[in-house]
Amino acid sequence: MTVTKGESAREGADDKGDMTGGAGQSGDGYVPSQRRLARERYRRARARRATAIAALSTLVTAAVLYLVVVNAPGWPRTKETFFSAHYAREAFPKVLEGLWLNVRLLLICGAAVLVLGMLIAVARTLRGPVFFPLRVLAAAYTDFFRGLPLIINLMIVVLGVPALRLQGVTVDPVLLGGTALTLTYSAYVAEVFRAGIESVHPSQRAAARSLGLTNRQALRHVVLPQAVRRQVPPLLNDLVSLQKDTGLVSIGGAVDAVRAADIIVGRSLNYTPYIVAGLVFVALTIPMTRFTDWVTARTDRRRAQGGSL
């Protein structure tokens, strides 16, 4: 395809008009050309149209789902059993009181998981034959606890440890449940950290060594900072999962949000408290999920722009 001299001149004039705002304009600020203003108006109109279509389709979908549910033959009984306003008001304060235990478990177990996961990941990436037993133990740990279902791990720790009657070992179901959560999630987090460490190019470590840093210093000051920054989104996803699974400590008798709901359900035979507990967990999870999405998008933008990760 060839471009004539006249077309080239017109395109150059349009570009110049976009940059200068056209002849006859004065002032220190940038004044967009009519062509640029028209393009911006078109983009805004297209965005408004897309938003309107999305809102309409969402409303239609919600209306259809609502009609399907409320017109189902068993809806009156389901509404009474799962969506009772009376039992929701009764359960809400007790569920909130139990939720404080879940939040404390998330904070304490989350910190322990990050520390233990980092140590296991570092152990798996140590070099040299002298560290072979340590690497084998770290690999066995991650393989075992990643394969063992969390619910079974909780039963073994919460119910099995007290049965041993060991002197000086706690039988508190909260502490034992937190220990089981830490054991399981540290295996997952260790693999996340290990993937981040191995994603750092070997030239980074070699450059650090050429500057006189020891292997330990290169790992601490060069490799780990890059590895952790790269793995922040998956780490946050694991913490979101941990937040939900803190409700499983109720199998040992700890009164958290789930157990508080279960007590009311056992007394009333109405399942609305479970719905209340579920919605409370969802409300707690959504901010963490949105923060994870924001961090992921920010990391992707910096990677696309060639910035540091």
Image (tube, rainbow, N blue to C red):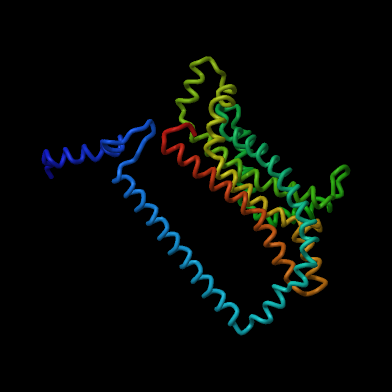
Indicate the position of residue 114 as horizontal and vertical percent values: 65, 39
Q: Nearest the camera: 221 or 42?
A: 42
Q: In which quarter of the image is residue 34?
A: top left
Q: Which residue appears at 73% of the width and 70% of the height?
A: 272
Indicate the position of residue 49 as horizontal and vertical percent values: 40, 60
Residue 210 versus residue 256 in the image, above or below:
above
Residue 14 versus residue 90 in the image, above or below:
above
Q: Which residue lies furthest to the bottom in this view?
A: 73
Q: Nearest the camera: 77 or 166?
A: 77
Q: Which residue appears at 42% of the width and 58% of the height?
A: 48
Indicate the position of residue 245 as horizontal and vertical percent values: 68, 54
Residue 229 versus residue 260 in the image, above or below:
above
Residue 268 versus residue 109 in the image, above or below:
below
Q: Quadrant of residue 107?
A: top right
Q: Residue furthest right?
A: 167
Q: Nearest the camera: 280 or 164?
A: 280
* Quarter that holds the N terminus: top left
Is 81 on the left or on the right of 206, as rendered?
A: right
Is 147 on the left or on the right of 309, as rendered?
A: right
Q: Which residue appears at 84% of the width and 50% of the height?
A: 172
Is 216 on the left or on the right of 260, as rendered?
A: left
Count of numbered circles in the view: 0
Q: In which quarter of the image is residue 167?
A: top right
Indicate the position of residue 116 as horizontal and vertical percent values: 67, 38
